[in-house]
Image (tube, grey):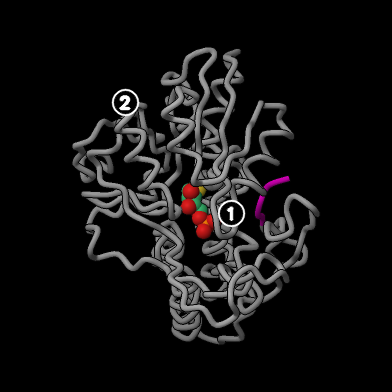
Amino acid sequence: MRTIDWNDESKSVVMIDQTLLPVELNVIECKNLASLCEAIRSLRVRGAPALAAAGGFGMALAVTLSSADSMEKLLNDLKVAASTLIATRPTAVNLAWAVNRVLKATEDSYDLESIKDIVVFEAIRIADEDVEINKAIGKYGQKLLDDGDTVMTHCNAGRMACVDWGTALGVIRSAVEKGKEISVIACETRPLNQGGRITTWELMQDKIPVKLITDSMSGHVMRHGMVDKMIVGADRITQDVVFNKIGTYTHSIVAREHEIPFYVAAPVSTFDPNGWEDTVTIEQRDADELRYIGDVQIAPKNVDVYNPAFDATPMENITALITEKGIFEPPVLIDEILM
Ligand code: MRU
């Protein structure tokens, strides 16, 4: 099944609860905006492209549940829902991109019913397009991988981070589909272990060989020639940097030191043409993510904690950006890619 989808019968958003992976594969249903926002904040759905789908479906929930009796009131309800959704996770720009795309689509509406139809239609279209886009990213990206390569990745940029297929893992899947033998080194990705829990699980399901390491081992494995290429996803790409899961920057420095190609695979909805590193808010997460693993306390209860969810990797550390429009080597002009 898809990571996240719209159920038109029950007018709800269905998703795999990623906080339970790999122990349990559980599907949950969000029937209102509050439960969807909770699912986004607690990372039941996560990963920039999946957040775009969640944003679009959030608007579909809002339009379905609104009791507005005029176009003006309904459009106002949608604007309020849009702000609520965008505020749930500030760094991954895809969420805001999707919400704004749905809002923009309502400009073509002419009555109450047409607004409802347009919003749901556009949300479903965003999710459907995501799958096609990931396949296109894979088609271009697989050309960069050679038979026998070992590819290191960080966090989870696989089908669970998207509607299906994946960006970074999509490139690997497409290479495997072409008959290349690829093995993967997955970094654990502390503190929430998306690499250890989700990337490994996804790849093992597809029978793609994967080895799990802690984040702190990446320098060691690169120094010992165990990595041919690194591919990660992205949460936001500005003119000067790529924002991705915390730890990506460190890997990029080690990769550069060891002349290992460092690729970023992302849809163009991840580009923020007006953004620069210092204009972007990096999401700060709850301190208890570092003090506990599940219910188990692993640090003093009141220890002061710094827990940014993302970091910024400068373009000079990136060999190429892999998008559905092709492969681009920095320095890049985002406006030209988006044209
Ligand atoms: O906090 P998360 O799990 O949402 O962070 C996800 C990442 O950083 C991914 O690498 C990124 O969203 C790209 S997913 C295709």
- Marker disc for residue 259: 2
**What residue do we see at 74% from left, 50% from top?**
22
Task: Based on the picture, tell me whether residue 248 belongs to the magenta stretch.
Answer: no
Q: Which of 303/279 is in front?
A: 303
Q: Which of 111/219 is in front?
A: 219
Element at label 2: loop
**Badge 2 vs badge 1, beta-carbon distance below 8 Å:** no
Residue at the front extreme?
A: 300
| Few, some or many residues within 10 Å of mark 2 (<14, 14–19, 20+) | few
Amino acid at pointer 1: Ile
Q: Position of residue 324 (x, y in %)?
A: 41, 34
**What residue do we see at 70% from left, 67% from top?**
294
**What residue do we see at 60% from left, 63% from top?**
43
Secondary structure mostly seen in magenta is loop
Q: In front: mark 2 or mark 1?
A: 2
Residue 229, compared with residue 41, is above or below; it is above
Residue range (magenta) = 1-5
The residue wearing badge 1 is 124
Q: Is residue 46 left or right of residue 305?
A: right
Q: Quadrant of residue 297?
A: bottom right
Residue 48, compared with residue 228, is above or below; it is below
Q: Position of residue 191 (x, y in %)?
A: 56, 60
- Spatial separation of the CA atoms under disc 2 and disc 1: 42 Å
Q: Of callouts 2 and 1, which one flags the residue occurring earlier in the amino acid sequence?
A: 1
Please indicate, yes or no, whether residue 323 appears anywhere in the rendered image.
yes
Q: Is residue 286 left or right of residue 205?
A: left
Q: Which of 108/84 is in front?
A: 84
Please indicate, yes or no, whether residue 106 appears anywhere in the rendered image.
no
Q: Quadrant of residue 291?
A: bottom right
